[in-house]
Image: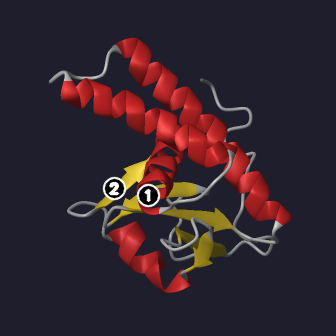
Amino acid sequence: MAEMPGLVLPAYYLYYQSPVKIVETPDGGARVWRVFIETGGWQEKNNLFVEVTLGVGGDIFRRTAEDFVQEVEAYRAHYLTGEGPIFALYETVRSIEDRADAEGRHLTLKEQALIRGIRQRTFVMFEEQLRADGDPGADPELLAGQPR
């Protein structure tokens, strides 16, 4: 990381609408993880490091950890289908959003808070499952200790 002394890790991005995180390795290096569209798991994409860190702007946006979690879960809910409690919660969020759209209105503050809470929960659930399945990029504790 000597090349990027101002970069504080972990760092979170939206890269062409795809969530990407850069985390520090035990030896002081960095690993780039991108959500894999087919599984929702993490795919190592270290070749994106320079483009993501130096290309912020246009189609690359820096995110806070909390906003990153929201982006990851919106992405997963949009691209993945399945059964079980995570997908039931994705459907709950979709129903809330669809109702507001059908009524021609923005989400209320209460609905926004509910969706944020559901997505935080599904993120942890999904990441715990990824970790159990051996995904090295999984991080169910990402928001642990973060102010809410």
Measuring from the top left, give residue 31's x and y in whole percent. Answer: 63, 74
Location of mark 1 (residue): 13
Q: Which residue is situated farthest in the left direction here?
A: 104
- What residue is rendered at 48% in x and 77% in y? 49
Name which quarter of the figure residue 101 lies in. top left
Location of mark 2 (residue): 61
Q: Amino acid at mark 1?
A: Tyr
Residue nearer the viewer, 45 or 42: 42
- What residue is rendered at 58% in x and 58% in y? 82
Q: Quadrant of the C terminus?
A: top right
Measuring from the top left, give residue 43's x and y in whole percent. Answer: 59, 77
Q: Amino acid at mark 2?
A: Phe
Residue nearer the viewer, 128 or 148: 128
Measuring from the top left, give residue 93's x and y in whole percent. Answer: 46, 35
Q: Are marks 2 and 1 in contact (CB under 8 Å)?
A: yes
Name which quarter of the figure residue 56 lies in. bottom left
Task: Using a 10 Å C-alpha cutoff, classify the residue at mark 2 as few (fewer than 14 neighbours), some (14 to 19) or many (20 or more).
Answer: some
SS for dot 2: strand
SS for dot 1: strand
Q: Which residue is situated farthest in the front direction here?
A: 83
Residue nearer the viewer, 86 or 4: 86
